Amino acid sequence: MDQLKRRYTTHYPGEGTTEKQLDEIEKALGIRLPKSFREISAFYSGGLLGGISHFAIPDDWEPNIKQETLRLRESIGLPSRFIVLGEPPESLIVMDTSGNPEVIWTDAADAANWADRALASPVDAWETYGAFFEVLLAEEEEERK
């Protein structure tokens, strides 16, 4: 994790999320955040990375993962174990807080099918949030060459 932090802070200032803020997100959403997500959140609080706009992690910024997760739980019945990380054009990136893979990037048209995992389109998936973050950080580094 230290290597990811060094690589990230080479390009951006470390603007992390506090443990208290992460605890409040867990309480509000009724979940436990994966370890790699908590560790990365100590220096990354959301925003543009690897050409993808991620929702803010702290809920004093908007849009943020808590409000977007609650919105999709209400509007499409997103199962409570998922957290919405971002909504790139015509797609959705979610984190499964109780399963593997942890990060799943799918077509937006499949968003309403998450309850039964009856997805019509193939997904991109990463075993951990750390693996997902590392791929996007590598893309960011490549763009900066």
Image (cartoon, rainbow, N blue to C red):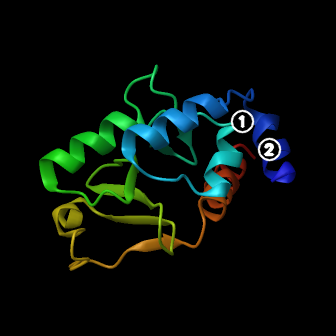
Q: Does residue 140 appear in the picture of this structure?
A: yes
Near mark 1 (Cα within 10 A), the count class, few <14, some 14-19 or many ≥20, is many
Q: Are marks 1 and 2 in contact (CB under 8 Å)?
A: yes
Q: Residue at x 59, y 57 (%)?
A: 34
Q: Residue at x 18, y 69 (%)?
A: 113
> SS class of the residue under badge 2?
helix
Looking at the image, residue 126 sits to the left or right of residue 6; the answer is left
Q: Which residue is mark 1?
A: 43
Choose the circle earlier in sequence order: 1 or 2: 2
* Along the viewing direction, whichever of 139 and 67 lies nearer the viewer: 67
> SS class of the residue under badge 1?
loop
Residue 27 position in % (x across, y down)? 45, 40
Residue 45 position in % (x across, y down)? 59, 33
* Along the viewing direction, whichever of 138 and 74 lies nearer the viewer: 74
Residue 71 position in % (x across, y down)? 23, 40
Q: Residue at x 71, y 43 (%)?
A: 144
| Quadrant in which the N terminus appears | bottom right
138 vs 14: above or below: below
Going by the picture, which residue comes out furthest to the left? 75
Going by the numbered disc 2, the residue's amino acid type is Lys
Q: Residue at x 40, y 51 (%)?
A: 83
Q: Which quadrant of the structure image shows residue 17?
A: top right
- Mark 1 → mark 2, Cα distance in angstroms: 7 Å
Q: Which residue is mark 2?
A: 5
Looking at the image, residue 94 sits to the left or right of residue 46; the answer is left
What is the total number of numbered labels drawn onto the structure image? 2
Q: Does residue 54 appear in the picture of this structure?
A: no
Looking at the image, residue 83 sits to the left or right of residue 18; the answer is left
Going by the numbered disc 1, the residue's amino acid type is Phe
98 vs 80: above or below: below
Q: Which mark is residue 53?
A: none
Looking at the image, residue 122 sits to the left or right of residue 138; the answer is left
